Amino acid sequence: MLEIEDWGYDPSWLEYVNNFHPGGGRVMRMDDDHPARLAFEQRSMDAFTARNIPFSYIKTYVSIQKPAEGGGYDPGYPHQHVPLSGTSLIHYLDPGDKPAPLHVLDGEEGEVIFEYVPEVGKTVFMPHHIWHGVPKNQGTTNRVQMIASAI
């Protein structure tokens, strides 16, 4: 279902996300020429290629899930990614002080069938057709990741 690799921790990637993202939304597309983004994009392309995951191009994103009150999911979650034939990877830079797990569901409003609690330096590969969501961040610090989509 999901595959997980340990890419290790690169502090320049976290610094990049924190500088790129101030005040932005939960997930923001990035396509600049910053060395940290280019290194992440290359690492992602190499990983997709090594797993024989086809792509014509890669989209990269920064993602910060801020602490929130209440339970459940943020609006728009759970969801799938489009195109459904693609694959994304999520590289965890800082899961926060109370890591919110990644849930895989058996449909749009289905039961949780798999849960992954993020760890610094781990990378999760997820086909776009999989329904998934992350509960609201119940911690006091941000949950920070970089995402790449093989399209």
Image: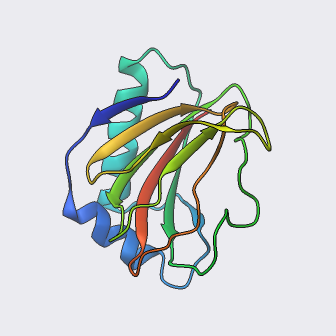
| Residue at 55 percent of width and 19 percent of height | 54
Taking the view exactly as shown, the residue that stands out farthest to the top is 52
How many numbered circles does the render carry? 0
| Residue at 49 percent of width and 41 percent of height | 115
User: Considering depth in this image, is 41 or 69 the residue closer to the camera?
Assistant: 69
- Left or right of residue 82: residue 104: left
Taking the view exactly as shown, the residue that stands out farthest to the bottom is 23
Rendered location of residue 92, percent (x, y): 36, 53
User: Considering depth in this image, is 66 or 72 the residue closer to the camera?
Assistant: 72
Rendered location of residue 114, percent (x, y): 53, 35
**Rendered-image quadrant of the C terminus:** top right
The answer to which quarter of the image holds residue 55 is top right
- Left or right of residue 110: residue 130: left
- Left or right of residue 138: residue 80: right
The answer to which quarter of the image holds residue 109 is top right
Rendered location of residue 35, percent (x, y): 30, 58
Q: Tell me which colouring the rendered structure shows.
A: rainbow
Rendered location of residue 14, percent (x, y): 30, 66
The answer to which quarter of the image holds residue 4 is top left
| Residue at 68 percent of width and 66 percent of height | 74
In this picture, is 8 found above or below 50? below
| Residue at 67 percent of width and 62 percent of height | 73
